[in-house]
Amino acid sequence: MSEPAKPTNPYTRKNPFQAEMIRHDRLTKEGSEKDTRHFVLSLTGSGLTYTPGDSLGVFARNSPQLVDELLGILGFSPDAPMKDPRGQPTTLRQTLLQDFTVNRANRKVMGGLSQCIGQGEQRNRLMEILDNADLLSSYVDSRDYVDILKEFDEARFESPELFIAQLSPVVPRLYSIASSLQAHPNEVHLCVSIVRYETHGRSKSGLCTGFLADHADMFLKNIPVYVQESRTFRLPKDSSAPIIMCGPGTGIAPFRAFLEQRVLEGAPGKNWLIFGEQHLATDFLYGEEFLALQKQGRLHRFDTAFSRDQEHKVYVQHRMLENAKELWAWLQNGAYFYVCGDAKRMAKDVHQALITIAQKEGGLSPEAAGEYVNTTLMKTEKRYLRDVY
C-alpha cells in the first residue's frame, strides 16, 4: 500500500502567506555585542505546515525613513502612480517600500547614473569607478542609493520609472525554523541576529533583520512568508538513533526545533548539544530551556563554548576535540552529526575537527579519516548533515 500523498502547502514563494507577528523578545542581554531576537509568527488560517529542519522564507520591507530620504533626494512625488513588478497599480513610495532592495546598492545603478550626469568632475569620477571592476565592487558594497545619490548629486533621473529600472527586486531571506509545529500549533519561531552597521557616516541595518526588529508591526497580518522544505536536514527516521547537534550563535535555531520534536515524540535516542557564543552572561541563547531539558534527562550531553569568557578563545570545535573519545564512541554507535551556522569559518573548522577525531580516536590515516567523514558519514550513511550559510 502506497503512502498517502503529503499535502502541499497552499502558500509558496510566488504566493506568500501574510503572517502576523505575535511575539518579539530580545535573547541577548544588556552588554552583549550582539542583538539576537526571538520572533513568533502566527500561521493561523494558512494551512502551512513544516518539519524541524525546514526554513521560513520572509519577504522584508524597506525602512520607511530610508525610502522617504531617497524620495527627497530624487525629487519625485511619493504618490507618483506606478505599476509594481506584478503589473498591479501602486505608488512610487509603495513599490520602493516593498518591491525593491534599497538598503544596498547594486552595480547597475552606476551605469544608469552615467546616463544622467553631464560632462565634468562628477562624471569623470563615475567613469573611473565604472572602468575598474574591483573598485566598482568595493564602492557599491558599502553604500546604499542615498550614499551614491548624495555623492553624485548632479545626477537627475528623468522619471521614477528610469530610477526603478536600476533596482534589484527584494528576494526572500531564509531562516532556519526554531520550533516544532506540534509543540507550537499554528506558530513558527525564528532566532535572528539583527545586522546593524555604519558606513559613510550613516547607520544602516540588514534588510530583513532590520524589518523584523524595527518595522514589522505586531498583530497585523502583513509579513509575507512561505515554508522552504529541506530535503536532507532532518531528524533520523529511527528515533532511537543518538544525535549530536553543533550550533553556535543563531545556528542553534533548528536544534531547538529538533529537541522540542524529540521530547514531544518521546524519542529514546540520546541528544548531545554543542552551543557556542561570546559570553555566558549575555549571549546564552535559550539557555534556561536547554538547562531545563538537561535537568529532566532529555538533553543527555550539553557542552558550551563561550569564546570570550577567558583569555584564549574557545569555540565549538575545541569542545568537540576535548570530548573526542566520547564523540567518536557516539558516531560508532550510529549517532547522526548535525551542524548549522556560518559556512565560511565555523563549518570548515567543525569539519576539520571531525577528521582529526577520526584520526585520533579511530586510528585512521589522514586520507582514511578524510574518506570516512567526506564519503562514509556524509554520502553513504548520510549521518553528517549540514545547514550552513
Image (cartoon, rainbow, N blue to C red):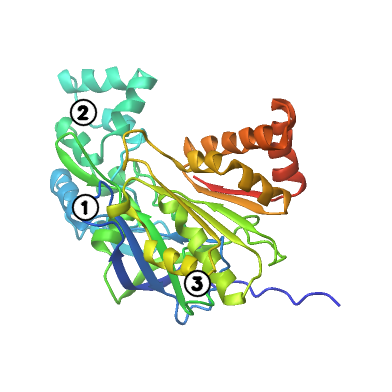
Judge from the rendering whether residue 355 lies leftward or rightward of residue 99; answer left or right.
right
Give the labeled residue for mark 2: 117
The amino acid on which the numbered mark 1 sits, given as a three-letter code, is Val
Q: Earlier in the sequence, mark 1 or mark 3?
A: 1
Q: What residue is drawn where x is 23% and y is 55%? A: 63
Identify the residue at horizontal 47%, vertical 68% (top origin). 295
What x and y, as percent, mark residue 381? 75, 49
- Could you say which disc has been placed on residue 296 in the image? 3
Density class for disc 2 (Cα within 10 Å; few <14, some 14-19, many ≥20) is some
- In the rendered view, does 352 fall on the left or right side of 237? left
Q: For the residue labelled by badge 2, is the local secondary structure a helix, a strand or a loop?
A: loop
Alpha carbons under labels 3 and 2: distance apart: 68 Å
Mark 1 or mark 3, whichever is nearer to me:
3
Dot 3 falls on a residue whose secondary structure is: loop
Of residues 239 and 8, the one nearer the viewer is 239
Q: What residue is pinned by disc 1?
A: 67
Q: Classify 116 as above or below 170.
A: above
What is the C-alpha distance between the residues marked 2 and 1? 23 Å
